[in-house]
Image (cartoon, grey):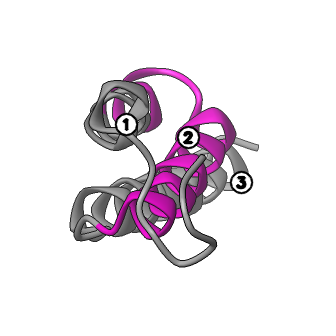
Amino acid sequence: MTAPGAPAAAGNDKTTLFGVLGLIIGLICCSPAGIVLGILSVNQAKQHGSPPTLGYVAVVVSCIALVFGIIYGISQV
């Protein structure tokens, strides 16, 4: 058992996986899913003591893609 403030084992660290999936899915097809995966990446990074940069990038890029998608959808009406 680990101490309360100690990082968890590296084998369970899915920070990069969630960050990359959030970035790709947020850009290609589904921005809300990219935002959720980016947030999961940030949470995993905080739990494991690794930098949450990729998660932040996934959230920001997915939000930008969502805004552009909304603007494009409104302009087509």
Q: Position of residue 33 (x, y in %)?
A: 64, 34
Q: Which residue is mark 2?
A: 37
Q: Is residue 28 above or below residue 14?
A: above
Spatial CA span between label 1 and label 2: 14 Å
The earlier-in-sequence mark between 3 and 1 is: 1
Q: Position of residue 73 (x, y in %)?
A: 66, 44
Q: Amino acid at mark 3?
A: Ile
Q: Amino acid at mark 2?
A: Leu
- Magenta span covers which residues? 24-49
Q: Position of residue 71 (x, y in %)?
A: 59, 60
* Disc assigned to residue 13: 1
Residue at screen point 56% across, 68% down: 3
Q: Which residue is mark 3?
A: 74
Tell me the SS state at disc 2: helix
Residue at screen point 40% across, 68% down: 60
Say left or right for 53 vs 29: left
